[in-house]
Every structure is written in structure tokens, then in C-alpha cells.
Image (tube, rainbow, N blue to C red):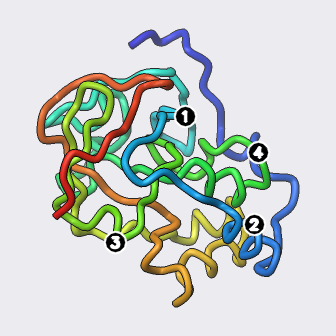
Amino acid sequence: MSDDLPTFDEASIFPPHHLDYATLDARVRGLSPAKDQAVVERVVLRLSNNRRRMPGRARLDVEAGVVGDRWLDGRTPKRHSQVTLMRYDVARVLTDGNEVAILGDNLFASIDTSAENLPPGSLLRVGTALCEVTYKPHEGCSKFAARVGEDAWKLTLSDDWRAVQLRGVHLSVIESGDVSEGDRISVLRRS
């Protein structure tokens, strides 16, 4: 991975304002994600000190997760949270059309991440890598609320949307491979 890729501090791309709950809810209801396959729209490496890098491609590794991501930094890594996948269409709504990398996820694609469509144990081909949807819920935290607003955070946790998993899913890498923006994410098996 080249060190000359641009990096940015997430604060430099925060949305200028946050949308209210009713607006977010209405916009998300109008979305229709793909069920079986979708295009990878964004690949993001989370660096230290809330910095991000968008290399356009990354290596997904059985041991290291997303190579170059801070997942391994200074702690005992947990395989059930190696990679995060969020719906790109939802991310664009929550950020009001601004850069989605601030959300802190590794991969963005407009695929249905609902518990019904991608239950834990589902297998996905992500570029050339093979990944499994894990049991760990991917829920927003206080950082997420600060990035896109309290109403966006509440929306993702609401009873109406919880099973849709608007925040996305966690993946573990089963077979190492590469993923680039423009590659496909395909559902191979649903559990």
C-alpha cells in the first residue's frame, strides 16, 4: 500500500448540518437496495487519530482483516469484527450526500444488509475474498452520533429499522483476497 495516498481527518469532512429524524426516515424509506449482489462503492481504511484513507482497493486477510486498517492496532483483535460493511445508499442519506468515509466503515455497497437478507453465517464474495457475516450487531456509537447527528443514530436503533440493520454488518474473512471500488459483493449463501 502506498504511503503517498491522501489521508484526511474526519472532522474536515463532517456534514455541515445534520438532518432531522423525519427527513432521514422518509429518505431511507425511499431506498431499494440490491438483494443478491452490489458494486463496492467505497473502500476505507481507518487510521489512528480518527483519520481515514480511501485507497480504492484493499487486501482482506484472514489474520489481519483489512490490511492497513487500525483493527489490529494495540488491542486483541476479534475476528467477528474484522471488516465492516455498510449500505452505501443509507450512508449517503445519513451524511446528506457528503463523504461516507466519516462513518468509520471499511466497505460501502448498496446491498440489503437486513437480518432477513444477510443473517449471521451468510457467505459473501467480496472482490476475490470470501467473507462471512458475523453474529456481532453493528450499531452506532457516540462517535457515529457526533458524525451524523443524534437523529441519525436514533433512526438506526429504532424498532422500525433495527432488523434492517441500517448501520450494516460485521464480516470475518474466511479466504484472503483483494477488493477494489467497482468490484462486486455477491451473496453466495444465506444461513
Q: Which residue is mark 4?
A: 98
Specify which label sits upstream in the sequence, 2 or 1: 2
Locate residue 96: give its quadrant: bottom right
Q: In terms of depth relative to the viewer, which is nearer, 98 or 125?
A: 125
Callout 2 crowding tier (Cα within 10 Å): few <14, some 14–19, many ≥20: some
Locate residue 98: give its quadrant: top right
User: Disc 1 residue type?
Assistant: Glu
The answer to whether mark 4 and mark 2 are in CB contact below 8 A is no
Image-based side of 171 in relation to 16, left or right:
left
Q: At which x and y percent is residue 19?
A: 82, 68
Q: Which residue is mark 3?
A: 116
Q: Which residue is mark 2?
A: 27
CA gap, disc 4 and disc 2: 15 Å
Specify which label sits upstream in the sequence, 1 or 4: 1
CA gap, disc 3 and disc 4: 29 Å
Q: Secondary structure at mark 1?
A: strand
Q: Residue at the location (36% across, 38% down)?
A: 185
In the rendered view of the protein, which quadrant contains the C terminus? Answer: bottom left
Q: Residue at the location (68% across, 65% down)?
A: 146
Q: Secondary structure at mark 3?
A: loop
Mark 3 or 4, closer to the camera: 3
Relative vertical location of residue 108 with respect to residue 56 in this rendering, above or below: below
Image-based side of 168 in relation to 99, left or right:
left
Q: In terms of depth relative to the viewer, which is nearer, 9 or 14?
A: 14
Mark 3 or 1, closer to the camera: 3
CA gap, disc 1 and disc 4: 14 Å
Q: Secondary structure at mark 2?
A: helix
CA gap, disc 2 and disc 1: 19 Å
Q: Which residue is mark 1?
A: 41
User: Disc 3 residue type?
Assistant: Glu
Q: At which x and y percent is residue 75?
A: 24, 51
Q: Residue at the location (30% across, 28% down)?
A: 67
